[in-house]
Image (cartoon, helix red, strand yellow):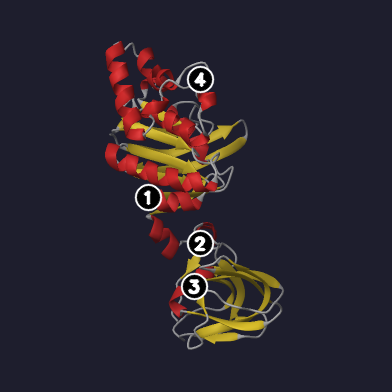
């Protein structure tokens, strides 16, 4: 187990900048998820950590030692790839023990470690099979086993579940989380799926366009996003953003269709803003404040009702944790707790404290 620190990391390919001044620290044994849209630079960070790419500037430290010039094979880091990267001509046992053979470990030691890890992962009966004889989930376990037998200082996972079906992804999320609790090895996990990041990680780093937007615990990001990007990326379905105006005096929020919501006059605000409301924060409790929406479509999933509605020509999502019979094109008032509202600057997207 080891600590990891990245200081002022920059990466360019020719004239194209990929990463901009990335800095973060990961304590010994922590599980951290790097999350963001495709192309934001999160996989590039893993490749730089693993020594598969050269750093343009900045430092990478493991246990307070700079490893910029250390060869990949000597960094004691194990990486699990999206496509498993198993050797097709080797059986499971040989795939898992390959790195130990490169280190010229005794055969008995290799067999012992492979057997121990296979038992932990529940793949002992697969050791004589070849990759083509395995399911996607089994291949992923073998890829993880190959990394685990090395007992590395750090695990790197690059979207390891993206090739699996939805049901198996849920199962593997749980298994990975349990595995980390057992091994307590520092883990950096890259994904574009914010549900994976929220359910598995101790800490989440949200990235966008080569920059870090916010670092925090999963629920901290959900409850207290620092800007519109984080608010819209964390949470599923995504947060709704309504165009609003706050006139001089700061005691009323006006919506584009003429509806309004009174707020505290202590807000020193004036101008155009985005008002964020998460789909799951709406309800049909008519005792609360709310807005009238035009209904576009309704999806009943059994325990939930997902409603697509319209306000001033823009569509929004509402998620009710109950069944609700609604006629299309009907106009319905959906309500919300005032404390759930988030206000964002319309120019730079930053979160603005709102007294309501």
Q: In the drawing, does residue 333 fall left or right of residue 126?
A: right
Looking at the picture, tell me which residue is in the foreground, 6 or 285: 285
Contact check, label 4 and label 1, Cβ < 8 Å: no
Contact check, label 2 and label 4, Cβ < 8 Å: no
Residue at the image position 33 percent from the left and 38 percent from the top: 186
Residue 176: x %, y % from top left: 38, 41
Q: Quadrant of residue 80?
A: top left
Q: Which residue is mark 2?
A: 231
* Precedes in sequence: disc 2 or disc 3: 2
Residue at the image position 36 percent from the left and 34 percent from the top: 121
> Around disc 4, counting alpha carbons within 10 Å, would you say few (fewer than 14), some (14 to 19), or many (20 or more)?
some
Q: Which residue is mark 3?
A: 281
Looking at the picture, tell me which residue is in the foreground, 337 or 253: 337
Q: In the drawing, does residue 292 fall left or right of residue 147?
A: right
* Precedes in sequence: disc 4 or disc 3: 4
Could you tell me how far apart the alpha carbons at marks 4 and 3 are, in whole angstroms? 48 Å
Could you tell me how far apart the alpha carbons at marks 2 and 4 are, in whole angstroms? 41 Å
Could you tell me how far apart the alpha carbons at marks 4 and 1 are, in whole angstroms? 33 Å
- In the structure shown, which secondary structural element does the residue marked by tag 3 occupy? helix
> Around disc 3, counting alpha carbons within 10 Å, would you say few (fewer than 14), some (14 to 19), or many (20 or more)?
some
- Closest to the camera, between mark 1 and mark 3, is 3
- In the structure shown, which secondary structural element does the residue marked by tag 4 occupy? loop
Q: Which residue is mark 4?
A: 87
* Precedes in sequence: disc 2 or disc 1: 1
Residue 245 visible in the picture = yes
Could you tell me how far apart the alpha carbons at marks 1 and 3 are, in whole angstroms? 24 Å
Residue at the image position 53 percent from the left and 19 percent from the top: 88
> Around disc 1, counting alpha carbons within 10 Å, would you say few (fewer than 14), some (14 to 19), or many (20 or more)?
many
Q: Which residue is mark 1?
A: 203
- In the structure shown, which secondary structural element does the residue marked by tag 1 occupy? strand
């Amino acid at each position: 187990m080891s600590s990891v620190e990245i200081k002022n990391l920059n990466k360019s390919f020719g004239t194209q900048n990929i990463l901009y001044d990335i800095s973060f620290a990961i304590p010994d044994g922590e599980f951290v998820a790097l999350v963001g849209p495709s192309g934001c630079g999160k996989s590039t960070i893993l490749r730089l950590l693993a020594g598969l790419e050269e750093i343009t500037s900045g430092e990478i430290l493991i246990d307070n030692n700079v490893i910029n010039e250390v060869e990949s094979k000597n960094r004691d880091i194990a990486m699990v790839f999206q496509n498993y990267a198993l050797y097709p001509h080797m059986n499971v046992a040989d795939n898992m023990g390959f790195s130990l053979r490169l280190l010229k470990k005794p055969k008995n030691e290799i067999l012992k470690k492979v057997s121990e890890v296979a038992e932990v992962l529940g793949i002992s009966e697969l050791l004589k099979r070849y990759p083509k004889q395995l399911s996607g989930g089994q291949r992923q376990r073998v890829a993880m086993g190959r990394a685990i037998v090395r007992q590395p200082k750090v695990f790197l996972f690059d979207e390891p579940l993206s090739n699996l079906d939805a049901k198996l992804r849920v199962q593997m999320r749980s298994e990975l989380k349990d595995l980390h609790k057992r091994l307590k090895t520092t883990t950096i996990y890259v994904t574009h799926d914010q549900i994976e990041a929220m359910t598995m990680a101790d800490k989440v780093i949200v990235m966008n366009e080569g920059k870090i937007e916010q670092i925090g615990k999963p629920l901290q990001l959900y409850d207290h996003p620092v800007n519109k990007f984080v608010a819209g990326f964390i949470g599923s379905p995504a947060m709704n953003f309504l165009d609003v105006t706050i006139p001089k005096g700061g005691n009323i929020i006006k919506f584009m269709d003429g509806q309004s919501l009174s707020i505290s006059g202590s807000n020193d605000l004036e101008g155009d803003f985005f008002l964020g409301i998460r789909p799951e924060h709406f309800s049909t409790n008519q005792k609360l404040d709310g807005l009238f929406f035009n209904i576009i479509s309704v999806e009943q999933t059994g325990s939930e009702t997902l409603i697509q509605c319209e306000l001033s020509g823009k569509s929004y999502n509402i998620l009710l944790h109950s069944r609700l019979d609604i006629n299309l094109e009907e106009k319905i008032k959906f309500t919300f707790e005032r404390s759930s509202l988030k206000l964002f600057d319309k120019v730079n997207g930053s979160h603005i404290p709102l007294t309501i």
